[in-house]
Structures are given as C-alpha cells and as structure tokens.
Image (cartoon, rainbow, N blue to C red):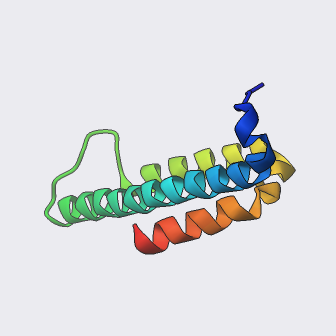
Amino acid sequence: MTTIPSGFEAFSGLLTILMLFVAGLLFGVGAKKAVTSAFLIVAGILLAGVLGLSIPLLSVNYVFSHAVAIFLSQAQHLGPIFYSFPIFWTVGFAVGIWKG
C-alpha cells in the first residue's frame, strides 16, 4: 500500500495513469532492444552454422523450441490477465518501441 502526500491526493488518478505510461514506455524501449539482441544472436548462430562452426549441444532448432516453450509457459501462467493490461501502459509500450 502506497501513500502519497496530501497535496497530491487530488491527482492520484492522473499520477497513476502517468506512471503506467512511463512504465510501458520504458518496457517498450527495453523490449525493442531485446528483440534486436535476440535477432542478432540468432543471426550469429546461423552464420556460424553456415561457416561450419557450432556450439556444442546448441542448435537453432533447440533455441527456437526452447524459446517457444518458455513463451507458452508464461502465457499459460499469466492467463486472462495478459489481456487486461491498462490502455495507457499499452500506449506507452507502443511509443517506447516506436521511438526506442
């Protein structure tokens, strides 16, 4: 339970919306950077495979199937709450990906 100073109580709804937007914005920027990094990792593994190099016990199929398993596990764990994220967080996320 958080408390805010009495002078800001009238603005608590606006502050909550603003914080949700900023959280979404930061998460969007981070997600864009993570997707770029993941793409470069996969590209590096593919290039190494073309050159005949390999990482022991690691292949593109293994990485892909493991990533899909993690995604499905998290989606199952989150359930319907995944679809109930606040709209301002979603807008912040979109802006973070777009401008990040």
Asked whether the viewer can see residue 99, the reply is yes
Q: Residue at x 23, y 60 (%)?
A: 44
x and y, in percent, of residue 38 in the image = 37, 57
Residue that lies at the very extreme toward the bottom in this rendered image: 98
x and y, in percent, of residue 23 in the image = 58, 51
Quadrant for residue 17, please give it.
Answer: bottom right
Q: Residue at x 67, y 64 (%)?
A: 90
Quadrant for residue 74, please give it.
Answer: top right
Q: Nearer the viewer, residue 88 or 43?
A: 88
Q: Nearer the viewer, residue 34 or 58?
A: 34
x and y, in percent, of residue 25 in the image = 53, 59
x and y, in percent, of residue 65 in the image = 53, 52
Quadrant for residue 37, please give it.
Answer: bottom left
Quadrant containing the C terminus is: bottom left
Q: Nearer the viewer, residue 38 or 51?
A: 38
Q: Is residue 48 left or right of residue 72?
A: left
Asked whether the viewer can see residue 76, the reply is no
